[in-house]
Image (cartoon, rainbow, N blue to C red):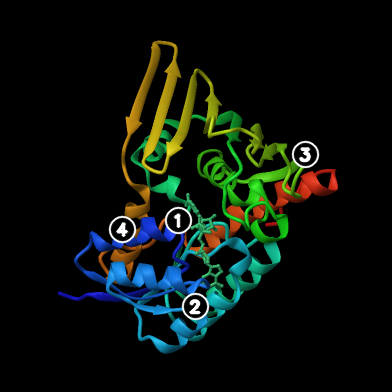
Amino acid sequence: MTRLRVGVVGTGFIAGRHLGALAGFDDVAVVAVADAVPARAEEAAARSGARPYPDGTALLETEELDAVWLCVPPFAHGPLEAAAVARGLPFFVEKPLGPDLATAEAIGAEVAAAGLTTAVGYHWRHLGLVHRAQELLRDRPVQLVTGAWLDRTPGAPWWSRRAASGGQVVEQTTHLFDLARLLAGEVDTVAAVERAAPEGDVPAASTTLLTFASGAVGSISSARVLGRRHSVGLQLVTEGLAVEVTERGLSDHQLRVSGAEGEETTGSAEDPIAAEDREFLDVLLGAAPGVRVPYAEGLRSHALACAADRAGREGGPVRLRD
Ligand SMILES: NC(=O)c1ccc[n+]([C@@H]2O[C@H](COP(=O)([O-])OP(=O)(O)OC[C@H]3O[C@@H](n4cnc5c(N)ncnc54)[C@H](O)[C@@H]3O)[C@@H](O)[C@H]2O)c1
């Protein structure tokens, strides 16, 4: 059996989920891991039977790999993708694609020129519940989209610095912007307001108004001042039907559908992280035709989240470019 040789750069929280998923597949071997904190790389290496590196670029320049998973914080994007592109190495990259749009656009241009196989961790797209929502909305034009990410402030030290994380809209609520694009189509313009927080420069709360190319309208809000996650989800209203997708945890999702005849709620314990990893591996092995979210597609959702963030910072509407 072919065993793909892969590396993982960044060995924090989400890398742990990917390493767990990859360990469950017998056609892939994690041969190298890197983290800017050497002890973290060594610990992950010991658990995976991999070689540890204190530097992701060194890993990419040294190891003979079939693919790499980039699980670093937003501020660390750029050099790692450039090193992967230089080696013609397919990569899976966690969202967001960077703390800003310029970094991701530059990488996107390099990826396109190299024709590299890539995948972005917009994991909601790998949920059966979301595929069911897509089916329900296929022939019903969406009229209204409402969404909210109401949560606590994550503990990672980089998160509360807007220049490092991109802020809540870019780092977290990006999943809802991505889902809105998937289920209601492209967005033409956004406008936003935000409320400053007493500590740090990531807003305490913000709200974005969206106008979709279809004519649908919407709003997506974010807040980070709670003691724990309250609710994370998106609702879509069409003629006679409301569809809601919510996330309580990475493997805890819900679809609620309300029509004239009544309401139906379906829960799911699917692991979308394992599903997106499996899909990427299958594409590399020639067993699947393509990934759901290649870099160019992830870049469109990132651009939308960045436009919402910019509208909040600068005031005034922002028009999305083609
Ligand atoms: N898909 C999801 O739902 C989901 C969930 C959680 C996190 N994420 C994303 O994953 C990324 C990482 O988040 P996390 O929660 O794992 O953060 P984390 O802080 O737990 O882990 C990040 C790790 O990267 C390391 N690192 C930083 N710069 C590096 C560099 N240049 N080279 C190598 N290692 C470096 C840090 O030392 C840290 O160990 C973020 O972009 C986040 O948005 C996605």
Q: Are marks 2 and 3 in contact (CB under 8 Å)?
A: no
- Tag 3: residue type? Glu
Q: Is label 2's Cβ within 8 Å of ligand 1?
A: yes
Mark 2 is surrounded, within 10 Å at the Cα level, by few (under 14), some (14 to 19) or many (20 or more) other residues, namely many
Quarter containing the N terminus: bottom left
> Element type at marker 1?
helix
Q: Is residue 80 above or below residue 257?
A: below
Q: Nearer the viewer, mark 2 or mark 3?
A: 2
Disc 1 residue lies near ligand 1 with CB under 8 A: yes
Please identify the residue farthest to the bottom as the structure is shown.
Answer: 62
Q: Are marks 2 and 1 in contact (CB under 8 Å)?
A: no
At label 2, the amino acid type is Gly
Residue type at tag 1? Phe
Residue visible at 43% across and 50% down? Answer: 123
- Of residues 134 and 168, the one nearer the viewer is 168
- What residue is pinned by disc 2? 56
Q: Which residue is mark 4?
A: 20
Q: Is residue 201 visible?
A: yes
Instruction: Tell me the residue that label 1 is attached to.
Output: 13
Residue 147, above or below 8? above
Where is residue 56? Give x, y as percent.
Answer: 49, 78
Q: Contact, CB < 8 Å: mark 3 with mark 1?
A: no
